[in-house]
Image: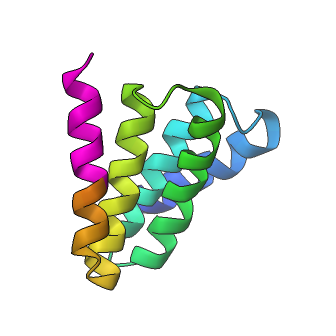
Amino acid sequence: MGALELDTLALEALSKTLPESDPQLLEARTAVGSGKAAMGDLEGAIVEFEKVVAVRSALLPDNHHDLLSARLNAAVARKHLHGDLLGALTVEENALEALSKT
């Protein structure tokens, strides 16, 4: 069994017992998204990354490192899938600006 399968099993188990906003669940979701991206499943990765962005956006300020990281993950996956260079650049610039203020 590979890392992606193990991460997916962990995510499924955590999803049954933890609220969507739990940091451990969000990290597991990010790991699954990263694994899917590494395996070439960019659409699946984007789904996982966008779920993390949605939850973190509801809980954290716009300049929070965890939210910026989640947005960057989604932007990079979209860039690779759709060639959305401008969209990814905008997210990256916004993240850099926010990080430079912290």
Nearer-the-camera pick, 45 or 78: 78
Nearer-the-camera pick, 82 or 26: 82
Q: Residue at x 49, y 56 (%)?
A: 49
Evaluate whether residue 56 shows in this view. yes
The C terminus lies in quadrant: top left
Q: Residue at x 26, y 82 (%)?
A: 83
The picture places residue 1, in percent across and down from the top left corner, at 44, 63
Decide: is 41 above or below 63.
below
> Magenta segment, which residues?
91-102
Q: Residue at x 34, y 61 (%)?
A: 75
Decide: is 89 above or below 78.
above
The picture places residue 101, in percent across and down from the top left corner, at 24, 20
The image quadrant of residue 95 is top left
Count of numbered circles on the image: 0
The picture places residue 55, in percent across and down from the top left corner, at 64, 41
Q: Residue furthest top?
A: 102
The image quadrant of residue 19 is top right
Decide: is 76 above or below 62.
below
Nearer-the-camera pick, 68 or 35: 68
Residue 88 as seen in the image, left or right of residue 25? left
Q: Residue at x 59, y 46 (%)?
A: 10
- Looking at the picture, the colour scheme in use is rainbow
The image quadrant of residue 15 is top right
Q: Confirm whether the magenta stretch covers residue 86.
A: no
Residue 75 as seen in the image, left or right of residue 52? left
- Report the magenta stretch's main SS: helix
The picture places residue 67, in percent across and down from the top left corner, at 45, 36
Evaluate whether residue 6 shows in this view. no
